[in-house]
Amino acid sequence: MRAAAIFGPEGLSVTDWERGFFRESGPVGFILFARNVDTPDQLRRLTGDLRDSVGWDAPVLIDQEGGRVQRMRAPHWREYLPPLDQAQTASDPEAAFIIRYKMIAAELRAVGIDVNCVPTLDIAGPETHPFLRNRCLGTTPEEVARNGRAVAEGCLAGGVLPVMKHMPGHGRATLDSHKELPTADVPLSEAGAWDFAPFRALADLPIGMTAHMVFPEAGPRPATQNPEMIDLIRTDIGFGGLLLSDDLSMEALSGGIADRAAASVAAGCDVVLHCNGKGPEMEAVATAVGPLTDAARERVGAALSLRKPAPDVDIAALSAELEALLG
């Protein structure tokens, strides 16, 4: 590991250029999207080749929430309800989420993926933008924390590391941060009692991801690039794990890609995510972030030490349990 970055490859296989760049830059790991997914065999080759390019068992991440944000889809993989729909449908939501993410973990590990960017601990409110709302796990801090803990337990039981997002809270977003920068127009004291509460309850998890969200009391910069907000994540929320930025490619952030990367690391993110697969941008990011700090390297090691072999699971039995809980 040399660059404090996680990169998304461009397509279904590793190109010669990518192989050389990944070997030279030494990213912390990789993240996959729908453009990288075709069949189970193809995906196994891709994850193996990505790890071969850096010469070690690097983590491979994906957003396999279920519902709209699900990179691996039918016919090769199961389709899942949007998380909020399942939270509101299941007779025992916590049990249902544990089972669901054990099943997802088995699907991921079968193709070489060992990190899932879940749980989404943002709280769904009446004004939450549709890009996010049905990805949430509930409408109160307590409900989100309970269901989020179940999601994390399901992942970890299946040999997959969870990534809680979007710290310190994105539920008040009325804009899509893929396109615009949202603002939480509340005092930090109010946000601390509501938005931050699920993250505080799950602060023991190994990995977290920041929000491209402005909290005006802390200034005009989004949390990803705001030292005051990163300090709040570390102190008020009490999160001591590996902190990833959300995707630098999202248009909530302003400036060039190198400036975005440098600002995120300077604010206190351990590692940045660059997800669009564009080679020149990846080169700029690798140069801008530089190597991992000593503290970030320790957090990477602590998180990855929790990876464990995938257990044998009876998918048919788990599926039957889930269907019974969903009625």
Image (tube, helix red, strand yellow):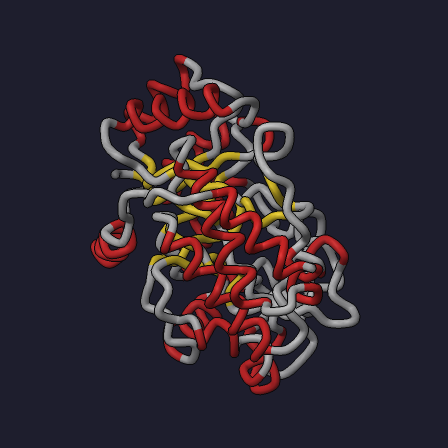
Of residues 131 and 68, which is closer to you in this image? 68
Q: Residue at x 76, y 56 (%)?
A: 130
Q: Is residue 164 visible in the rendered structure shown here? A: yes
* Rendered location of residue 264, percent (x, y): 45, 54
Of residues 302 and 327, which is closer to you in this image? 327
Q: Is residue 293 above or below residue 258?
A: below
Q: Residue at x 40, y 44 (%)?
A: 313
Q: Is residue 263 left or right of residue 35?
A: left
Q: Is residue 258 left or right of residue 250?
A: left
Q: How many marks?
A: 0
* Rendered location of residue 18, percent (x, y): 40, 21
Q: Is residue 205 above or below residue 311?
A: below
Q: Quadrant of residue 200?
A: bottom left
* Rendered location of residue 298, percent (x, y): 22, 56
Q: Is residue 21 visible in the rendered structure shown here? A: no
Of residues 100 and 221, which is closer to you in this image? 100
Q: Residue at x 49, y 52 (%)?
A: 101
Q: Residue at x 34, y 48 (%)?
A: 159
Q: Where does the C terminus fall, quadrant-wise? A: bottom right
